Amino acid sequence: MFRRSIYKTPAQLRSMVEPGLITAAALDAVRPLIRAGVSTIELDTAAERAITARGAESNFQLVKGYHHTICVSVNEQVVHGIPGELVLQPGDIVSVDCGAQFDGWNGDSAITVVVPDDTRPDVVANREELSRVTEGSMWAGIAAMATASHLGEVGAAIQEYIEAQGPSAVSGETYGILREYVGHGIGRKMHEAPSVFNYRTPDPGAEIKPGLVVAIEPMVTAGGEATFIEEDDWTVSTVDGSDGSHWEHSVARHEGGIWVLTAPDGGAAGLAPFGVTPVPLA
Ligand code: MG
Ligand code: MG
């Protein structure tokens, strides 16, 4: 059986720059719309417009059985929420996952935003902290891509970052990391080998070397890590009803270093606290 190498050539890596930037532009279009009174389908429409305006297509719509451009997951929903008539409320924590395919190559990225709510500052603070911990763990994992030899070190870096943040103010225990859902290789398809775990595993995982491109995407909860799939057959929600957050970037390791394909600055701002400077693709 023919198996495509998980390592891309320099030319193939360059082909992934544009779909990454288009994915970033789609999330940039959605971000300012995440406010009270907006329905989640409106977010989907904005993302689709941003992608098609750049001559790309939604790769989420290429997933069998899925008909939308984004996944939008609110409060106890962590990932894979379907856009619809749901109207965002003050204080909601909203994760948006999106991807674009351009000229046969893919990008995949996710953000979390908390809707302001002056009447519930404690709720907002806890949710913003959950998002901060999740985003920080993503950057810790991305930073590990610069120096690690195997993907298992990325998962360990993500878990260590989360554990170092101390207990969740909501549960009093360490933030939960989803176990059944993981990051992945990305290229000609949005989802490719190898898997990128968000926690320590006995298996060292795939070798990290020039040509590896992966989507690093921690999914974190303010409570337990157990989830179930809602009756819509897609939405992944926490069993204990605790809030979830999801952050994701597509990251390339190349001869010169690492470059975050789905960040216009290559990840410079997010990586700075870790002492890593991204290097543009040659
Ligand atoms: Mg994604
Ligand atoms: Mg992904």
Image: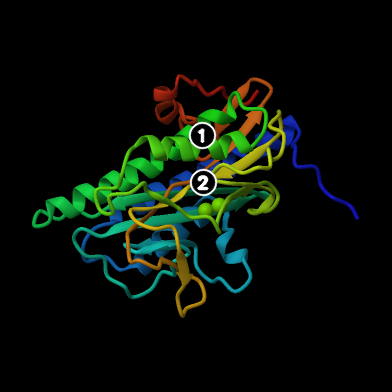
Residue 134, image x, y percentages = 39, 44
The vertical placement of 271 against 122, above or below, is above
Tag 2: amino acid: Ile
Q: Quadrant of the N terminus?
A: bottom right
Camera-nearest residue between 22 and 195: 195
**Which mark is nearer the camera, 2 or 1?**
1
Camera-nearest residue between 266 and 276: 276
**Position of 203 compared to 279: left or right?**
right
Q: Quadrant of the C terminus?
A: top right
The vertical placement of 45 against 278, above or below, is below
On whether ligand 2 comes within 8 Å of the CB at mark 1, the answer is: no
The vertical placement of 265 against 54, above or below, is above
Q: Residues within 10 Å of mark 1 (few under 14, many from 20)?
A: many
Q: Is residue 235 visible to us here? A: no
Circle 1 SS class: helix
Residue 266, image x, y percentages = 50, 30
Q: Going 40% across and 27% down the picture, which residue do you hit?
A: 269
Q: Which residue is mark 2?
A: 22
Circle 2 SS class: helix
Task: Give the alpha-carbon distance from disc 2 to disc 1, as whole Å.
Answer: 28 Å
Q: Which residue is mark 1?
A: 157
Residue 81, image x, y percentages = 43, 67
